[in-house]
Image (cartoon, rainbow, N blue to C red):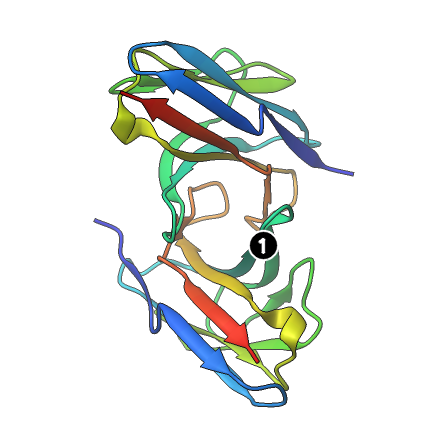
């Protein structure tokens, strides 16, 4: 079975902090994605990566960066957290561009 | 602009009352239409992929169908455990795997 693991289910941080969200997949998938999910706005793509050390901006990359040093791990970084980044963050991976994405259970991040 | 719209936003059914969820899409060069189920506090769980008009997929009480403009998720004789939010997403002609998600339909099945 496909397994995408996000390091924290709940996280509380303060404005201005640098925040790291970690995601690991065990399927040897090429592609990995970071989304945020907000009521009324649905899932929005922040960044994605189709290979190690490769990254592409999604629809809402401002205020975020990513790192993919190993194939199985994709990290989302909030450079200087702000209250409008309070959200549910979801990581996903897929084998190929036409293949389904498999999601982790999310990190609910609160920025105070 | 590529867009995916789901209706209704919310649906309440009695146990055993069959119904359909709609997903309308305007995605240029659609390369796949995906259905997911999401339970509260969890990530979306993959259900089906449909690649071409006329295609159908089934799993237990769920059947997904695809036309050139929309997809339907038919729920036959639902049970309370089918209560969840159902998301559809389209993959367009770009070669990035980027999905365009609808807002979802929240289904509640009462015993």
Q: x and y percent of residue A22 in the render? A: 40, 75
Residue A22 visible in the picture: no
Task: Identify residue for label 1.
Answer: A38
Q: x and y percent of residue A30 in the render? A: 42, 59
In-front residue for pair B74/A26 = B74
Does residue A49 sit above or below A15 in this rendering? Answer: above
Query: Disc 1 is attached to a residue of which chain?
Result: A
Which residue is most to the left? A1
Which residue is most to the bottom? A17
| Residue at image point 58% right, 29% down | B9
Other residues around mark 1 within 10 Å, as few (<14) / some (14–19) / many (≥20):
few
In the shown orientation, is residue B54 left or right of residue B59?
A: right
Q: x and y percent of residue A92 in the render? A: 43, 56
In the shown orientation, is residue A25 left or right of residue A47?
A: left
Does residue A43 sit above or below B57 in this rendering? Answer: below
Does residue B58 sit above or below A14 in this rendering? Answer: above
Residue B62 visible in the picture: yes
How many marks on residues? 1
| Residue at image point 35% right, 31% down | B83
Does residue B16 sit above or below A39 in this rendering? Answer: above
| Residue at image point 26% right, 62% down | A26
As helix, strand or loop, the secondary structure at mark 1 comes to strand
| Residue at image point 55% right, 71% down | A54
In-front residue for pair B85/A22 = B85
Which residue is most to the front? B111
């Amino acid at each position: 079975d496909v397994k995408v693991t996000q390091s924290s289910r709940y996280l509380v941080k303060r404005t201005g902090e640098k925040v790291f969200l970690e995601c690991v997949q065990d399927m040897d998938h090429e592609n990995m994605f970071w989304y945020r999910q907000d009521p009324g706005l649905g899932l929005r793509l922040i960044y994605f990566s189709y290979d190690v050390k490769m990254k592409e901006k999604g629809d809402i990359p401002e205020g975020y960066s990513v790192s993919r040093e190993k194939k199985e791990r994709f990290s989302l970084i909030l450079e200087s957290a702000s209250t409008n980044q309070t959200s549910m963050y979801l990581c996903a991976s897929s084998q190929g561009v036409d293949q389904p994405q498999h999601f982790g259970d999310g990190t609910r991040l609160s920025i105070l | 602009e590529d867009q995916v719209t789901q209706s209704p936003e919310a649906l309440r059914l009695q146990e055993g009352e069959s119904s359909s969820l709609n997903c309308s899409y305007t995605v240029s060069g659609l390369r796949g239409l995906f259905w997911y189920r999401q339970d509260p506090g969890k990530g979306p769980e993959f259900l089906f992929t449909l690649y071409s008009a006329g295609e159908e997929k089934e799993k237990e009480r769920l059947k997904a169908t695809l036309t050139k403009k929309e997809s339907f998720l038919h729920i036959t004789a639902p049970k309370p455990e089918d209560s969840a939010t159902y998301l559809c997403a389209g993959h367009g002609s770009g070669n990035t795997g980027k999905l365009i998600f609808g807002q979802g339909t929240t289904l509640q099945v009462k015993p």
